[in-house]
Image (spheres, rainbow, N blue to C red):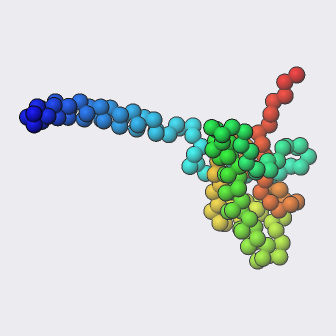
Amino acid sequence: MNRMLQTKCVLMAPLVLVTVTGCLDALEQQTKKSPNSIIGKTTQDITEFDPTAKAEVSDGKVRITNPVTGPLEAYGPALEQISQIQIVPALRLFEAENGRYPTSYDEFMEKIIKANNIRLPVLPGGKTYQYDVKEAKLVVINAPTTETP
């Protein structure tokens, strides 16, 4: 009986090895990141906020509408909040040193973003970063929606 078990193990070992190797290749392909993926990418692409443009400013709140896709729905707002973690202290430090906030978009880019080498996470869904000079804060603009007639 023991000999029969050894023979089965010897015959099954190559089958198990081929199966595991095949699964590992499939797993590698499954976890391969798409070149279009925004995950892990950063940017310094920030434009100047124009209050007359009537762009929709994101409130950064997480709204879960589906328990299955909830984590995906939370990803964008989480990135918005993470970006504020970098910008707010830099703005406060600038204000403490100069007695004012940056008075122009160019000063914001030079003294806040570039001087501190701040790189913000790329936002999903076509959202963009803009600096509101009047309010001295970074805002996230929702992608424009196309209206159907």
**Which quarter of the figure has residue 26?**
top left
* Residue in the picture at 67% in, 57% down: 82
- The answer to whether residue 21 is seen in the rendering is yes
Residue 90, how many percent across, how many down? 71, 68
**Up/down of 22 relative to 102, above or below:** above
* Residue in the picture at 80% in, 50% down: 59
The furthest residue to the top: 149
- Which quadrant of the figure contains the N terminus? top left
Left or right position of 1 against 43: left
The furthest residue to the front: 1
Residue 94, how many percent across, how many down? 75, 72
- Which quadrant of the figure contains the C terminus? top right
Residue sitting nearer the eye, 75 or 142: 75
- The answer to whether residue 10 is seen in the rendering is no
Total residue callouts: 0
Residue 43, how many percent across, how many down? 64, 51
Residue sitting nearer the eye, 96 or 70: 70
* Residue in the picture at 72% in, 59% down: 84
Residue sitting nearer the eye, 26 or 34: 26
* Residue in the picture at 50% in, 40% down: 33
Left or right position of 62 against 23: right
The furthest residue to the right: 52
Residue sitting nearer the eye, 70 or 100: 70
The furthest residue to the left: 3
Left or right position of 21 against 95: left
Left or right position of 68 against 87: left
